[in-house]
């Protein structure tokens, strides 16, 4: 399926999706409240069948925190990038997609520890790579740490 | 040995040992000969330098020619820990524990820029320990990113020379002459307990 056909099908199930132009993969952003229901449809839909989530990334956009999902269909071999963001930097919360793609569990833990984004309904939201007593979220632009030697 | 006394590598082996009588020095020589030619490394590699260490152990370069023979998977059977790779703050207490579990005499080779000083991660890193000597005492430093197998072999040979200087009355000549580092108990990993810092 070409990106344009894919775009049509997705607009049919979620008219609110905003597409970005000129990307390698079809890219869209969606309000965070809609994310979970949309993700369920992406996986459930017979025509789309996005059954594999291969990456979750956090992005610090200074004004907002963004989460990027890379989806792949092992049946149709098409790829989709879904973005969602929250402007709350103090207590950012986004719905977890663990119950849809199980692999999200580790990805979300990683995003949680590096960006401090909390995922609602995540079964086990703990740190993944850093020490258990690490303070702060190192991948945020405003992160400061006495241990860091600046250059 | 003191820095001024160093001339070249070969003269290290002729380095005059302090004190001792004929019988003891002869026994020392035998013990040192045995020890220095059978240093067993611990299977320990934390990142890319580890690959180079494996290459050194493999057939082309072949560690074993120099007696640094079999990799041991248990610290209790190992003589030397080659810290091959980046040590992050989460790994530091584990490394410390491994070092503590090794039986004396034990030696440490810091292989690669990361283990020497933090290397490429010295600046702007929130997780990397700047040099393994913050955690455990180091005998031989091998610079490089990663060091070539030849460099590791050379480092191993330097360690062997160091071992040959040991005597019974002064078992770790190398260790006792190392300048003591001022240690801040707050940040020292030697006081690091699992989970609590
Ligand atoms: S010194 Fe270089 S090659 Fe060795 S572990 Fe560090 S980054 Fe990797």
Image (cartoon, coloured by chain):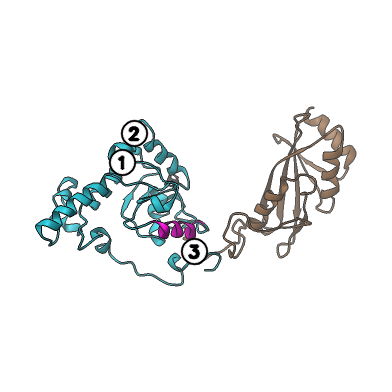
Q: Colour of chain A?
A: brown
Q: Which residue is mark 3?
A: A147
Residue at x-position 52% and y-position 58%: B90
Q: Colour of chain B?
A: cyan
Q: Which residue is mark 2?
A: B61
Q: Position of residue B39 (x, y in %)?
A: 31, 47
Q: Chain of mark 2?
A: B
| Above-or-below relation of B73 to A88 | above
Q: Which residue is mark 1?
A: B153
| Above-or-below relation of B58 to A135 | above
Q: Is mark 3 within 8 Å of ligand 1?
A: no
- Report the magenta residues as a range: B91-102
Residue A3 located left or right of residue B174: right
Q: Which residue is more in the foreground, A3 or B179? A: B179
Residue A108 located left or right of residue B31: right
Is residue B193 a member of the stretch shown in magenta? no
Q: Quadrant of residue A48?
A: top right
Between the C-alphas of marks 2 and 1, the distance is 9 Å
Pointer 2 or 1: first along the chain: 2
Q: Are the two marked residues, 2 and 1, in contact with CB atoms closer than 8 angstroms? A: yes
Point out the frontmost of discs 3 and 1.
Answer: 1
Q: Position of residue B113 (x, y in %)?
A: 39, 49
Q: Residues within 10 Å of mark 2 (few under 14, many from 20)?
A: some
Between the C-alphas of marks 3 and 2, the distance is 39 Å
Magenta: main secondary structure: helix
Residue at x-position 48% and y-position 66%: B192
Quick one: SS at disc 3? loop
Quick one: SS at disc 2? loop
């Amino acid at each position: 399926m070409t990106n344009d056909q894919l775009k049509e099908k997705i607009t049919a199930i979620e008219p609110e999706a905003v597409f970005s132009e000129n990307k390698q993969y079809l890219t869209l952003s969606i309000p965070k409240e809609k994310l979970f229901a949309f993700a369920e449809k992406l996986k459930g839909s017979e025509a789309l069948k996005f059954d594999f989530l291969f990456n979750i990334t956090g992005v610090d956009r200074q004004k907002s925190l963004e989460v990027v999902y890379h989806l792949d269909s092992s049946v149709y071999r098409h790829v989709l990038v879904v973005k969602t963001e929250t402007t709350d930097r103090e207590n950012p919360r986004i719905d977890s997609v663990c119950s849809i793609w199980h692999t999200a569990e580790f990805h979300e833990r990683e995003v949680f520890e590096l960006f401090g984004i909390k995922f609602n309904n995540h079964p086990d939201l703990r740190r993944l790579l850093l020490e258990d007593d690490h303070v702060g979220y190192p991948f945020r632009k405003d992160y400061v740490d006495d241990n860091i030697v600046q250059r | 040995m003191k820095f001024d006394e160093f001339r070249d590598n070969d003269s290290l082996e002729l380095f005059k040992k302090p004190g001792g009588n004929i019988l003891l020095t002869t026994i020392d020589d035998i013990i040192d000969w045995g020890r220095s030619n059978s240093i067993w490394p611990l299977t320990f590699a934390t990142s890319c330098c580890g690959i180079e260490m494996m290459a050194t152990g493999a057939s082309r370069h072949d560690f074993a020619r120099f007696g640094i023979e079999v990799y041991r998977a248990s610290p209790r059977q190992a003589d030397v820990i080659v810290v091959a790779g980046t040590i992050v703050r989460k790994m530091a207490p584990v490394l410390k524990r491994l070092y503590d579990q090794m039986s004396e005499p034990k030696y440490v080779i810091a292989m690669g820029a990361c283990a020497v000083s933090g290397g490429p991660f010295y600046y702007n890193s929130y997780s990397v320990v700047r040099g393994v000597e913050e955690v455990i005492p180091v005998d031989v430093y091998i610079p490089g990113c990663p060091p070539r197998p030849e460099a590791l072999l050379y480092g191993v040979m330097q360690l062997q020379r160091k071992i040959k200087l040991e005597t019974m009355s002064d078992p770790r000549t190398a260790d006792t002459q190392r300048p003591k580092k001022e240690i801040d108990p707050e940040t020292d990993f030697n006081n690091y307990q699992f989970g609590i810092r």
